[in-house]
Amino acid sequence: MSEARDPYPDALRAAALLIVVLGHWVATLPRVEDGVLVDTGHILEAWAPAGLFTWLVQVVPLFVFVSAAVSSEGVQQRLDEGKPHLHWWAERALSLARPTVTYLAVLTVFVAVAFFTREGILGPLNHSLTVHLWFLLTLLGVQLLLPLSVWADRRWGLGAVVGLIVLVAAIDLLRARPTSPGALLELGALVTDTHDLFAWVNTALVWVVPQQLGIAWWHGRFAGRRTGIGLLLFGLSWLGLAVASGYPVSMVNGNVGGHTNLLPPTLALLGVMWLQVGVVVIFETPVRRFLQRRHMGRWVAMLGALGLQLYLWHKFAELPAAWLGTRLGFPIDAGVPGETGFWIGRLEWIGLCIVMVAPIMIAVVSFERMRRRDVASTTSMPAILAGGIALIAGLGISLGLGAKPGAVIGLVGVAAASYLLRARR
């Protein structure tokens, strides 16, 4: 790769971010009774075909793939120079912790206001406001393993990807415990009907696979339109066979320990990775040429710089969107798919979210510009370990308990991480 900043990875992350934001808004189904928001549903629960669309909107593998690709050379350089990887990881963790402190602090204020005013909007959206923090946990985890992935790529190349997939398959087989070769035809059903604790090992293995593949792509181990088409078809076949064997169609179901491909991850989830990587490889040359010819690299990089803030705050926009929608009598609760006006109601809901996220982003960006930007991260190993544990714990509590009381408790952990991960003067 050239030394000049390549706009293609930035464009991939920007596109993935927009897909996530719109996908989250589409998935939220407000339920209104007598002009009051009483609950929120999920489109997967109301419309079975939505599971197929998750093959397109589950873009976390793409984020991990691209992030690992652009980070791998720096990781290798630091390893060659003898610099500890944890120093770089602490810098990344601090860059996540600081804006997350702001987000959780604002949620805490809203929790307090809702408690004293008895405002009913917060309750139905309680978990929706923190559920997206799981991606930050995933990203922190896989980035911690980057040196191992870089070493594995140098040692085995694409063989490292194959080895990881074999391990993922082994975990699923141990979950399923097929008693005969014929039982393999029902592998997916057997896997998701069994919930052994060791299945959570795939939480690490599955998300490291796109990281390993991203490093291989960045170092030119596979490329070309034919390869991309092959990967795309391979992904479709993978997903088709997985669903035929009983794995759930949806790739985003957050039902812990239930009939899900996500919690814990399964072999089926890798199918969306092949689809996305296929698309990346197919359009690599024409899109890169277009971006360079149109000199769009700066604009794409600018959108990428706002990515974390938009990801954090786009769910928060649902609060004012729901409040305004109920006050104005908009059809944000349009029933279920198939009923008259459902999709028109969806468009109005998404429109409200877009209108509300704009001033929120202006306020957030204005606040971030006033803050000190270049905050050095610590190089103290005890501080990095303590800060990392505090950050992961704070995010996990916020994710599991929702805005109330998760954000309030999680804020303590994330704020502590923001302090511990800073370099002491």
Image (cartoon, helix red, strand yellow):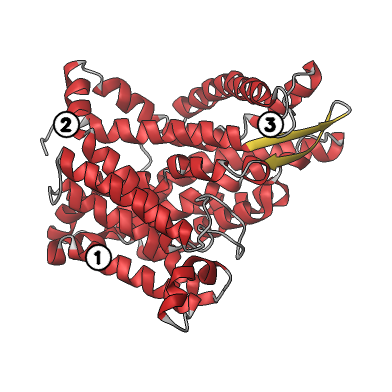
376, above or below 141, in the image: above
Q: State the residue position of label 3.
A: 338
Residue found at the far right of this picture:
34
Q: How crowded is mark 1: few (under 14 residues within 10 Å), some or many (20 or more)?
A: some
Q: What percent of the width, then of the height, locates residue 283?
A: 23, 32
- Mark 2 or 3 closer to N-term? 2
Q: Is mark 1 on a helix, strand or loop?
A: helix
Q: How crowded is mark 3: few (under 14 residues within 10 Å), some or many (20 or more)?
A: few
Name the residue tied to disc 1. 162
Measuring from the top left, give residue 168's x and y in whole percent: 37, 68
Nearest to N terminus: mark 1 or mark 2: 1
Q: Badges 1 and 2: C-beta atoms under 8 Å apart?
A: no
**Residue drawn at the location 32% of the way across and 53% of the way down:** 210
Vertical position of residue 195 compared to residue 374: above or below: below
Residue kind at label 1, given as amino acid type: Val
Please tell me the numbered disc located at residue 285. 2
The tag earlier along the polypeptide, 3 or 1, is: 1
- Specify whether residue 303 is in view: yes
Tag 3 and tag 1, C-beta contact below 8 Å: no
Task: Give x and y (percent) for residue 391.
Answer: 50, 55
